[in-house]
């Protein structure tokens, strides 16, 4: 039975259609990018709900987001995590759709995804779905904010899910550091409280049930005038407006009270403070937090971004360049950490070397020196003008991304920006006056600073009550008497940026549907694609420098990583201005050699390519640099071994599957033996055995593409046959397990079910089966059985080899218990699959087809798709449409048959990677001769 509110609302909707009863604001003139193909309409519903409609022509997906101006900062005292818990509960049934998994199942079978997050002062819910399924998704989504049931049985169950989420992050250093820092803040401030929640904070208490408190919190805070709504899809603005009214005008408008101004984040006289934090992983960081005035209302001037861009600059004369020259730092970042209507915090993070740990006061002094440079006189006009110009350029050539991300950003912006700036506000950058920026600069002082040292074995005295992190909090000892740091005068504010693009002409030619080969030789290849869909003066260039020794040797893989680090460090001060001007590069090691990717505005792209190649040819490093880079790589590999249990299980799975592949343990063993001379010798001989494959995608001409290939050939002449990528092993028939040893209180379970061949039909079958299984497995294992926060079933293809993966990380259940529950689910779901209607099957089928045929949203995404096919040697460049065509041809009987074969009868190989306990009666994978296993061959396609 629907609530009386729904019957009342039905009458209002009918009346609204006839009499336009909702309030239509005078349309603000939304500022929209000239490259934006969308249409927009802003309105305010009769209940005060601020709404933005986005008509997205040609889009395959539709999306919606609701943001509520309430978050963990509004948790009642001693009810830490209540706002977060409420976010979980809204997914578990509403009056029109009381079944807990109905919303998730609908989204899943219609090719979509959904999520939500709770921040300090905002909670946002969102989904993305096939365009044709938008109305049904809204039918299920809107009641979250009108009539959630808060079903008592799910209240008890979901407390366990929240607790599992808390426990899954218990050894996550990001969460631990975030929580430990709060111990230094004013305990009366909302931001200082624990925000996730657990079984203790969400327990029923004498005279107070948590469900009653949920209902009270919802009624008090979830009010229409505190919400923003964004609807986006390939529909007319009129249709979107009709849905906004029909679905959301019933969101109640409560009599909410205005929030009082909170107490200060730090009490008067509390700062300066020094905080020590001992991490789980090998992290070394010096962090500075400055509480500053409110800045959200100054979004058109962006004072925090202005300051952060200077403190975080990495070019010549920067703070980071000085710290690196001294051997004290590996990296530096600066930015806003927390922003409310009343205050802001700015954080500067310095990644330390081992040597830097011994010079924290000198690093602090260097930071204060650079801040004084910013305070000495008004900032040079060219700096603010550059920032404004680059922001306008980014807005002019705005690229679309995932639609769900876009609606989340817009709904969040609506909580902050004026209506006409909802789109433009992120890019709006007016010159800031000295009186406007002065209060923020004044706040950057040693007397107004929380200085945090994060490192192993730091001195600690107390323990964070929420995550068990060892910490020490004391009044700051800076500045030390007679502290001197020489060479500070080498620092200066950034010079004018030479990489700001000037030529914005589109130069592409020879339009084709897919990339074409301009060079196709045994030792080198050049593929070219003239962009047709995205009219932007940008290009993406990938240069794969294939080296057989890097592919086949763990030692060479380690040397390659040290070599690329050397090159990247040498280029950093040169390339950083290019990056902030919209042209960036990335040089990294992959399974075949080194991959250089340059992307962005193409005006100065060839110049950057030449500089990178030149530096690669002449790379040198001294003893101090070698020691730093080697230690850094060692930390990265050791930290990889301390990852989340489910992540480690997937890493171990992939290591077993690929040939060749090297584990972190193998790389660490080789790293111990490496010397500086080894790296120098590697650099000198890098071109001795080399092949290259280039891909130029964008608005450069064929002649320019060929010229770039010539640049590569001139520096590293190709002299070796092009390589094939790493191949995937055929898993042994039957069931096999492998232990994954992670120092973590959670268990982990990953079941990998491998397909039998690499045909498009097999890939289509596994993908569709994964699509069908995803929501019900989650519903059974997480919502009903409460086995863990991290639960998913998904297609898990590796290269062109299809597979399914079932993954659970649990704070309580053993792997054996998880397997038993999974098998129970498999048996029960076989009955559901046998009785599935043709209509429901077609929904899943269409959902996957739409997902596979979804058009790229930007040039980078399109280039990545073609590059992926190129890597698989699929020169027809049609993997996704070809698989989609096979999905269309599948029948329900095909899926039922494959499910019986692969899951029920277990005729397909099962590999189980587990942490926290062995599985009974399942053979050890280590008994199998891995090297003797047959490899899948890449499918052959015509060029």
Image (spheres, grey):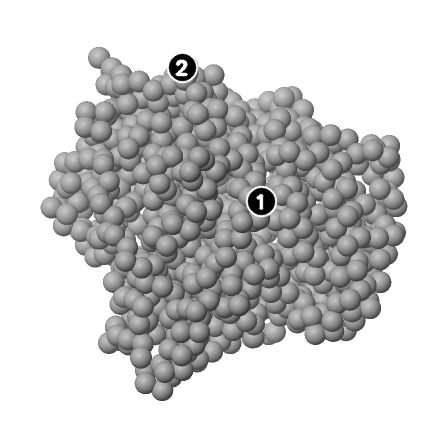
Q: Residue at x 34, y 20 (%)?
A: 473
- In this rendering, would 576 be left or right of 267? right
Can residue 823 be seen from the camera position used here? yes
Q: Most extreme residue toward the front, as rendered?
A: 207
Q: Residue 693 appears at what percent x and percent y?
A: 64, 54
Q: Determine whether 156 is above or below 231 in the image.
A: above
For marks 1 and 2, the one nearer the N-term is: 1
Q: Most extreme residue toward the left, as rendered?
A: 435
Q: Residue at x 70, y 47 (%)?
A: 806
- In this rendering, would 866 be left or right of 938? left
Labels 1, 2: front one: 1
Q: Residue at x 44, y 25 (%)?
A: 465
In the picture, which quadrant includes the C terminus?
bottom right
Q: Residue at x 14, y 41 (%)?
A: 438
Q: What is the spatial separation of the Cα atoms under label 1 and label 2, in whole angstroms?
A: 37 Å
Count the marks: 2
Q: Residue 609 appears at what percent x and percent y?
A: 48, 51
Q: Residue 753 appears at what percent x and percent y?
A: 78, 49
Q: Nearer the viewer, residue 450 or 620?
A: 450
Can residue 701 be seen from the camera position used here? no
Q: Which mark is residue 736?
A: none
Q: Determine whether 654 is above or below 920 in the image.
A: below
Q: Residue 74 appears at what percent x and percent y?
A: 34, 44
- In this rendering, would 931 be left or right of 873? right
- Mark 2 surroundings: few (<14), some (14-19) or many (≥20) residues within 10 A: few
Q: Which residue is mark 2?
A: 461
Q: Quadrant of residue 574?
A: top left
Which structural element holds mark 2? loop
Q: Which residue is mark 1?
A: 157
């Amino acid at each position: 039975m629907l609530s009386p509110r729904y019957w009342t609302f039905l009458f209002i909707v009918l009346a609204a259609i006839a009499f336009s009863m909702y309030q239509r604001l005078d349309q603000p003139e939304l500022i929209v990018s000239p490259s934006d193909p969308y249409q927009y309409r802003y309105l305010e519903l009769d209940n005060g709900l601020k709404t933005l409609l986005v008509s997205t022509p040609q889009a395959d997906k539709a999306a919606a987001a609701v943001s509520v101006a309430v978050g963990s900062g509004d948790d009642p005292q001693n009810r830490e995590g209540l706002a977060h818990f409420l976010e979980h509960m809204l997914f578990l049934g509403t009056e029109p759709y009381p079944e807990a998994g109905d919303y998730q199942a609908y989204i899943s079978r219609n090719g979509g995804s959904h999520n939500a997050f709770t921040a300090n002062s905002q909670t946002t819910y969102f989904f993305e779905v096939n365009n044709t399924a938008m109305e049904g998704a809204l039918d299920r989504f809107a009641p979250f904010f009108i009539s959630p049931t808060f079903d008592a049985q799910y209240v008890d169950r979901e407390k366990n899910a929240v607790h599992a989420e808390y426990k899954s992050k218990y050894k996550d250093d990001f969460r631990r550091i975030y929580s430990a820092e709060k111990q230094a803040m004013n305990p009366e401030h909302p931001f200082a409280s624990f925000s996730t929640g657990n079984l203790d904070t969400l327990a029923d208490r004498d005279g107070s049930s948590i469900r009653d408190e949920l209902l009270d919190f919802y009624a008090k805070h979830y009010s229409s005038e505190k919400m923003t709504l964004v609807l986006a899809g390939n529909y007319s603005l009129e249709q979107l407006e009709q849905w906004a009214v029909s679905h959301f005008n019933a969101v109640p408008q409560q009599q909410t009270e205005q929030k009082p101004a909170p107490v200060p984040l730090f009490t008067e006289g509390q700062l300066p403070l020094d905080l020590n934090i001992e991490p789980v992983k090998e992290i070394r960081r010096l962090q500075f937090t400055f509480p500053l005035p409110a800045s959200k209302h100054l979004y058109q001037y962006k004072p925090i971004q202005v300051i952060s861009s200077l403190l975080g600059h990495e070019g010549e004369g920067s703070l980071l360049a000085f710290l690196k020259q001294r051997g004290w730092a590996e990296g530096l970042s600066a930015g806003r950490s927390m922003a409310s209507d009343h205050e802001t915090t700015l954080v500067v993070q310095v990644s330390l070397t081992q040597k830097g740990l011994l010079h924290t006061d000198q690093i602090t002094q260097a930071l204060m020196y650079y801040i004084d440079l910013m305070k000495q006189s008004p900032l040079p006009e060219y700096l603010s003008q550059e920032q404004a110009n680059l922001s306008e350029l980014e807005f002019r050539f705005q690229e679309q991304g995932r639609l769900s991300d876009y609606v989340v950003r817009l709904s969040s912006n609506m909580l902050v920006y004026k209506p006409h700036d909802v789109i433009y506000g992120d890019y709006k950058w007016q010159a800031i006056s000295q009186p406007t920026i002065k209060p923020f600069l004044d706040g950057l002082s040693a007397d107004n600073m929380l200085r945090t040292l994060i490192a192993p074995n730091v001195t600690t005295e107390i323990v964070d009550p929420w995550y068990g992190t060892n910490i020490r909090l004391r009044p700051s000892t800076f500045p030390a008497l007679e502290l001197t740091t020489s060479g500070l005068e080498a620092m200066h504010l950034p010079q004018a940026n030479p990489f700001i693009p000037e030529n914005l002409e589109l130069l592409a030619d020879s339009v084709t549907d897919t990339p074409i080969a301009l060079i196709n030789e045994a030792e080198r290849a050049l593929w070219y694609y003239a962009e047709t869909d995205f009219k932007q003066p940008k290009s993406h260039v990938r240069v794969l420098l294939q080296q057989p020794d890097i592919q086949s040797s763990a030692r060479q893989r380690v040397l390659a990583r040290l070599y690329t680090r050397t090159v990247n460090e040498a280029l950093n001060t040169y390339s950083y201005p290019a990056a902030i001007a919209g042209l960036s590069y990335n040089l990294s090691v992959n399974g075949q050699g080194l991959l250089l990717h340059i992307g962005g505005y193409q005006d100065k792209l060839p110049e950057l390519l030449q500089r990178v190649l030149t530096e690669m040819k002449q790379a040198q490093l001294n003893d101090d640099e070698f020691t730093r880079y080697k230690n850094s790589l060692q930390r990265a590999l050791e930290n990889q071994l301390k990852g989340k249990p489910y992540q480690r299980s997937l890493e171990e799975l992939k290591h077993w599957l690929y040939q060749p592949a090297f584990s972190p343990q193998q790389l660490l063993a080789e790293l111990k033996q490496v010397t500086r001379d080894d790296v120098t010798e590697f650099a000198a001989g890098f071109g001795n055995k080399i092949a290259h494959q280039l891909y130029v995608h964008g608005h450069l001409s064929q002649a320019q593409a060929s010229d770039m290939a010539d640049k590569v050939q001139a520096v590293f002449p190709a002299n070796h046959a092009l390589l094939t990528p790493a191949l995937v092993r055929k898993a042994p028939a039957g069931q096999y397990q492998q232990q994954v040893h992670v120092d973590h209180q959670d268990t982990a379970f990953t079941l990998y079910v491998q397909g039998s061949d690499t045909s498009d039909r097999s890939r289509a079958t596994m993908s569709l089966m994964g699509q069908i299984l995803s929501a019900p497995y989650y519903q059974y294992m997480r919502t009903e059985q409460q086995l863990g926060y991290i639960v998913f079933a998904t297609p898990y293809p590796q290269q062109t080899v299809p597979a399914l993966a079932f993954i659970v990380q649990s704070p309580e259940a053993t792997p054996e218990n998880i397997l038993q529950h999974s098998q129970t689910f498999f048996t029960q779901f076989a009955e559901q699959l046998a009785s599935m209607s043709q209509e429901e099957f077609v929904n899943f089928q269409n959902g996957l087809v739409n997902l596979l045929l979804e058009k790229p949203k930007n040039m980078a995404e399109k280039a990545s798709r073609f590059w992926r096919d190129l890597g698989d040697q699929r020169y027809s460049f049609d993997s996704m449409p070809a698989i989609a065509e096979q999905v269309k041809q599948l029948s329900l009987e095909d899926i039922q048959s494959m499910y019986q074969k692969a899951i029920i009868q277990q005729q397909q190989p099962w590999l189980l990677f587990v942490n926290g306990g062995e599985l009974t009666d399942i053979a050890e994978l280590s008994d199998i001769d891995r090297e003797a296993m047959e490899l899948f061959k890449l499918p052959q396609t015509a060029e």
